[in-house]
Image: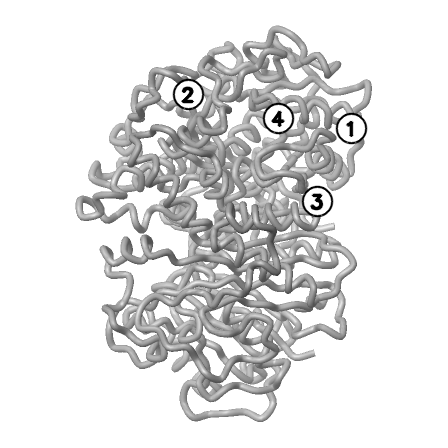
């Protein structure tokens, strides 16, 4: 059964929203990378504008444009991945609770702190009474939602909205400095692939995709494979497992025209990308994407957004390519993401 | 139509017991676990009652033979406690090679640690990495040495039920052969204060489906089930089959169910369809039954709409455990399965008078020899998230 991506929209730290192509000029950041915000007045009434935090607005605006673009009759279900959910609302409620010693608190930020606020809001806006799932598992939150959509399509649904949404707040950014999560400032997001230092670059994003059972004029790509390994059990086991799964999808390693790696600048975690690059995909064309979006739990969703543009335009921008190799025709893109040798995710998108 | 899915092991810790047997005995003997807080520190401790597990983190770690300086959040410790029991119960041991998924649901994750150290990260930075929902699932996988597939759902109060549903569907579709599934949540000041701002906390033990119900009691716990495909558990003791499941959205409001109860109606109806059953086949419903005005009324409306004159016997076991949020769906799945295993219906505590708009009332006494083949379990949550599971005697 073929499964298609019929809509793909991303709000990110770059000018990607509503863009048919990958922006060639990157915005440079020397600290945390935050979303380039659209004019939210086009999407929300004044009450919503006041009540809703930035992540909810980004999520709902990106979802709205993705749904528009896909031109579907009915939205059957929604699956959202978010590693940390609505951080700003969580922080607000937590801070107020501590400041007032559990005194006078208001419910709005508590309600909106719940991870499934994002998916729930879209269900309300679109009166979607179908399945509504929120996955919150670190760096595979988005991939879990994508896998959910594949199951839902196999179960007979036609159109599933899938999102990858996370936010970085100044407070969380500062908090994670205590565990040396980030690079020392000033860093440069453009350098995520030439880093010799530990720590990553902070990013965020809201990417939505319409995952559909039918191919339409709006189709970007076909999803050929979504494969998750909590632990890889070493390169040779990984290579063997991947090979088998690619074969199940009617592909081989040789069919992969581009491998997009989730390099995030952390010299420790990135060694695992080096291994997979050098030992499994040595002869392939390599690319990367986190200099566009920074690192966050659902950054793989930005990679998928990028892959939809690469396949549709049949063009890999210069600043995405890692190394010197190129290819004229990009049919099959494999995305690989992991986190310190855990939660390995492999996604294959194909031209169709 | 895919692989059949069976429950072959269960583990549980809640305010009414530290294992399956203790929970079962408390349910039979109408012994609830709602009390004043002894362990969690909050300024509201004299105003509320909760379903608190009366073991400190240190005592729990000792039971698990983990070093006492382990910095796991309570949510994680509870989950490991229940997971070890479930894994043993299913006759499994470290080193089993079947392709296994570990899928849990939680809402607070490591919030108990975060709210303690948030302003003093220099004292203890561990909470920064243990806060996220996925942390617990990975620790459970590590504790059982499982490495294949791990993920976490956070859909408010239906999280645990949704984790069970995903595990069943992954087995049905042949993606894994076995799944360790369930939910876990500890009490935290964050959730106590949150529900307090919504005026949803009953200061006394809750009375689900009673006319004068005043709200819910928060609770804590973890429930873990081992699910296996038919081919893996051929020769084994099976508690039941997971025959039906559905998740639907009420698409009405973030914290309240619509008065026509569209979402709960759909999830119950669709679960029955997935199970290829008829409404009349359902012998008992373990209802969501939080004890809030809105939930019990709308859940009742949905049951009357779906079952008409023949609403099966039902009860809310939240009157024993409190509302354990992300764990609730898993705890109640286990109680539903115990109901099949022992052919018994557990009573709903503190019920006095029927809700005037409804024509149904819950079971208030233990019903033995209840002729139970199919049990329905409801879990409804914020964000209009409604899940129904159906368990069937083999």
Give the residue pinned by disc 3. Answer: A129
- Pick whichever, A12 or A342, lies toward us: A12
| CB contact under 8 Å: marks 4 and 3 | no
Q: CA distance from mark 1 to mark 4?
A: 16 Å
Q: Chain of mark 2?
A: B
Q: Which mark is residue B295?
A: 4
Q: Respond whether the residues carrying marks 4 and 3 are from the same subunit.
A: no
Task: Name the side, left or right, on which A75 lies relative to B231.
Answer: right
Q: Say which quadrant the N terminus of chain A sits in.
A: bottom right
Q: Is residue A242 above or below residue B89?
A: below
Can residue B63 be spotted in the picture? no
Q: CA distance from mark 1 to mark 3?
A: 17 Å
Give the residue pinned by disc 1. Answer: B306
Give the residue pinned by disc 2. Answer: B50
Q: Kindly state the secondary structure of the residue where label 4 is placed.
A: helix
Q: Kindly state the secondary structure of the residue where label 1 is placed.
A: helix
């Amino acid at each position: 059964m073929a499964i298609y991506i019929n809509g793909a929209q991303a709000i990110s730290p770059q000018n990607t929203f509503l863009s048919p192509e990958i922006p060639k000029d990157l915005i440079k950041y020397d600290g945390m990378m935050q979303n380039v915000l659209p004019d939210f007045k086009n999407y929300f009434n004044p009450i919503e504008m006041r009540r809703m935090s930035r992540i909810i607005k980004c999520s709902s605006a990106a979802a709205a444009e993705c749904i528009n673009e896909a031109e579907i009759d009915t939205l059957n279900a929604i699956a959202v991945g978010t590693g940390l959910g609505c951080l700003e609302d969580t922080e607000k409620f937590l801070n107020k609770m501590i400041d007032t010693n559990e005194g006078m608190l208001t419910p709005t930020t508590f309600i909106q702190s719940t991870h499934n606020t994002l998916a729930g809001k879209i269900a309300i806006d679109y009166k979607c009474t179908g399945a509504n799932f929120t996955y919150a598992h670190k760096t595979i939150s988005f991939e879990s939602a994508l896998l959910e959509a594949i199951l839902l399509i196999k179960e007979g649904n036609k159109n599933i909205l899938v999102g990858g949404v996370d936010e970085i707040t100044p407070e969380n950014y500062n908090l994670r400095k205590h565990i040396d999560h980030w690079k020392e400032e000033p860093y440069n997001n453009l350098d995520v692939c030439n880093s010799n230092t530990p720590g990553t670059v902070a990013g965020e994003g809201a990417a939505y995709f319409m995952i559909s059972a039918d191919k339409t004029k709006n189709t970007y790509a076909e999803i050929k494979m979504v494969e998750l390994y909590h632990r890889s059990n070493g390169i040779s086991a990984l290579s063997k497992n991947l090979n088998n799964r690619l074969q199940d999808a009617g592909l081989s390693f040789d069919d992969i025209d581009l491998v997009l790696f989730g390099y995030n600048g952390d010299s420790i975690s990135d060694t695992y990308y080096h291994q997979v690059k050098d030992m499994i995909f040595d002869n392939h064309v390599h690319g990367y994407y986190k200099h566009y979006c920074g690192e966050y739990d659902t950054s793989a969703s930005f990679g998928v957004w990028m892959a939809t543009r690469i396949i549709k335009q049949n063009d890999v921008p210069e600043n995405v390519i890692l190394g010197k190799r190129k290819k004229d025709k990009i049919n099959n893109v494999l995305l690989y993401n992991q986190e310190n040798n855990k939660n390995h995710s492999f996604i294959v998108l194909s031209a169709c | 139509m895919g692989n059949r899915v069976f429950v072959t092991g269960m583990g549980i810790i809640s305010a009414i017991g530290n294992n399956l047997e203790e929970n079962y005995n408390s349910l039979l003997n109408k012994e609830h676990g709602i009390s004043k807080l002894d362990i969690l520190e909050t300024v509201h401790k004299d105003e509320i009652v909760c379903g608190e597990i009366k073991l400190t983190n240190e005592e729990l770690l000792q039971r698990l033979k983990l070093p006492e300086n382990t910095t796991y959040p309570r949510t994680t410790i509870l989950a490991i406690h229940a997971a070890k029991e479930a894994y043993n119960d299913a006759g499994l041991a470290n080193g089993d090679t079947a392709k296994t998924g570990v899928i849990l649901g939680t809402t607070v994750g490591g919030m108990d640690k975060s709210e303690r150290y948030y302003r003093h990260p220099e004292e203890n930075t561990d909470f920064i990495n243990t806060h996220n929902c996925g942390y617990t699932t990975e620790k459970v996988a590590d504790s059982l040495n499982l490495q294949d597939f791990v993920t976490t759902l956070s859909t408010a109060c239906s999280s645990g039920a949704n984790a069970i549903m995903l595990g069943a569907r992954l087995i049905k579709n042949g993606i894994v052969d076995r799944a360790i599934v369930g939910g876990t949540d500890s009490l935290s000041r964050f959730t106590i204060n949150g529900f307090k701002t919504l005026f949803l906390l009953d200061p006394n033990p809750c009375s689900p489906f009673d006319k004068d119900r005043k709200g819910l009691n928060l609770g804590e716990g973890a429930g873990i089930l081992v699910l296996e495909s038919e081919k893996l558990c051929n020769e084994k003791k099976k508690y039941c089959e997971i025959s039906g499941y559905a998740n639907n959205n009420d698409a009405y409001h973030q914290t309240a169910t619509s008065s026509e109860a569209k979402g709960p109606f759909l999830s119950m109806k669709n679960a029955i369809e997935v199970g290829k059953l008829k409404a009349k086949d359902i012998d008992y419903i373990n209802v969501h039954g939080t004890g809030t005005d809105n939930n019990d009324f709308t859940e009742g409306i949905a049951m009357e709409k779906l079952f008409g004159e023949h609403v099966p016997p039902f009860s809310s076991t939240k009157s024993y455990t409190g509302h354990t949020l992300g764990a609730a769906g898993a705890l109640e799945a286990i109680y539903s399965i115990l109901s099949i295993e022992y052919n018994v219906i557990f009573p709903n505590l503190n019920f006095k008078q029927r809700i005037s708009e409804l024509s149904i009332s819950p079971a208030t006494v233990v019903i033995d020899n209840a002729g139970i083949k199919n049990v329905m379990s409801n879990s409804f949550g914020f964000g209009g998230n409604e899940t129904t599971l159906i368990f069937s005697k083999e």
